[in-house]
Amino acid sequence: MSHLHVPDGILPVWLWLSGILLALAASSLSLYMVRGMDLKKKIPLLGMMSAMMLVGMSLEIVPIAYHVNLSVITGIILGPWLSVIAAFMVNILMAMAGHGGITVVGLNTLVVGAEGVVGWALFRVARKLFKPGLAAGLSTLVTLFMSTCMMLSIVFIANVDFASAGAHGLREVIESPTFTKVMGVAKLNEGFNFRLFAYAAFGLGSLGWSIEALVTGMAVKFINKVKPDMVR
Amino acid sequence: MDIARIDYWATSGTSTVHKATAYSKVAASALVVATVVVSRDLYVLVTLYALVLVTVRAAGLPLKKVLAISLYPGLFAVLFALSQAGQGWALPAVIIMKALTAATAMLLLVSTTPYADVVGLFGRFLPRVVADGLFMTYRSFFILIKMLDNFLDALKLRGGYSPRRLVRNAGNMASGVGMLFIRAYDLSQRLYDVMSVRGYSGKLSGGRPSGSFHAVELPYPASAAALLIYAEYASRAGLASDWRVLASVLLAYITGMEAIRVWKR
């Protein structure tokens, strides 16, 4: 739920193209940040952890059409920079298997990559206050709420009818520093019920976040008992 | 997702589509996705979908199973389409056709092209870490999914899974995920050691895709290009699509593929 299962040709070209450019920039920054690491040694680990994300994504919780991403736990193990690269690779593979559009790979990389980075950062803070399992569970819950908000923002932006605002309005929108001004100039496409979409995403999503937080929390608790170095 | 089955189709197939170079199949898939992106005409999309399905049949892939896999993104498209239902039935139908066509085209690509060839091709444009990571991820997936299957079997055999005890099941499953992460971590270190012994120097993939271009692989990308040009022309001219043009493209493609099949026999 937290990333976009939107097929090709639905989102405006400027939006998915921006997503691809931003994802490339994020991946390039990540590659730059890990330049000091022995990447030769990290590639098998990167591959294994990305494959774990794929395994998680292949386990569908049918009644609510949700699958776990395991992106937070991957972020905790790999660190923030490698988790962005892992998100990029996983989304390419998912798109090739028909799971989400190929043009949405950029936006999905941003959302799933942000889950890895934010989850890692929250876990670093939370583990000072709670036990590792609880810290991982809480970090996952907050992170997935954040990524669902990101996903909804993308859907909202995709449905803002800039054309109806006219050329002058469009310039105002682009130059506008505040969200309220955007709302004042542009309007949502007629026929698209954003509120209904948001209710569905938060309603089904909250159940999914709880499941993923439980799985991540208990998995981290288990890892911390058996191999604590992995989650330090 | 059924990556294991897709991998089997890609490596075991012997059809003309399987033998075509990765370049022509990637080009054709890109043209199909480009048409899906630019066109909002239902008839163009239906014709394009028919073109992809004809190619699936020509590749000797089981049509029902391919359709079943491609329905997964279609399911999400239905949810998205329903949120647009206020504008009548045409827009939801266009959304669903876009999803099905693009997903089936991507499935056709990966079901008829060995993964090493696809990664080899993309690896020429991607950083080495990403290209090698993609290769490693794909291979690791099969190892991990096998481990997961074994874990689930063991869990059921030892009474760790009971349909009525959801919390206990979730706890056991989560421990299993934790164990799987530990096994994956250990395996990655062992893999690195084994590869180092065998002379791994930080380069896994990147070979050129095998095979050379033959004229028989031209119809698929050519037909997709024809539909893209027509869709763009009709869109710019503000015209509704002409079914006779679309039917001609499809008929010419089917005839061409049938002629190739008879000639190859």
Image (cartoon, rainbow, N blue to C red):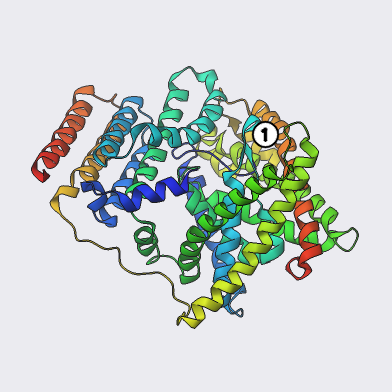
Q: Residue furthest right?
A: A129
Q: Please name whichever residue, A176 or A70, is drawn nearer the observer in this view of the structure.
A: A70
Question: Would you say residue A221 is visible in this rendering?
Answer: yes
Q: Residue furthest left?
A: B263
Compared to B196, does B43 lie above or below? above
Q: Quadrant of the N terminus of chain A?
A: top right
Please give left or right for residue B85 compared with residue A228 in the image.
left
Please give left or right for residue B249 compared with residue B155 in the image.
left
Point out residue A13 in the picture as x, y percentages from the top left corner: 45, 44
Q: Amino acid at mark 1?
A: Ala
Please give left or right for residue A22 compared with residue B249 in the image.
right
Residue under the point 81% across and 57% down: A221
Q: Please name whichever residue, A95 or A110, is drawn nearer the observer in this view of the structure.
A: A95
Question: Would you say residue A30 is visible in this rendering?
Answer: no
Compared to A227, does B17 lie above or below? above
Q: Please name whichever residue, B265 or A132, is drawn nearer the observer in this view of the structure.
A: B265
Compared to B152, does A65 lie above or below? above
Q: Quadrant of residue B52?
A: top left
For mark 1, name the chain: A
Point out residue A14 in the picture as x, y percentages from the top left corner: 48, 46
Q: Residue furthest front?
A: B157
Point out residue B153 in the picture as x, y percentages from the top left corner: 63, 46
Q: Please name whichever residue, A167 or B136, is drawn nearer the observer in this view of the structure.
A: B136
Residue under the point 29% across and 50% down: B25
Q: Quadrant of the C terminus of chain A?
A: bottom right
Secondary structure beneath disc 1? helix
Point out residue A204 in the picture as x, y percentages from the top left corner: 70, 32
Q: Which residue is mark 1?
A: A201
Residues packed near mark 1 inside 10 Å, few (<14), some (14 to 19) or many (20 plus): some
Q: Quadrant of residue A50?
A: bottom right
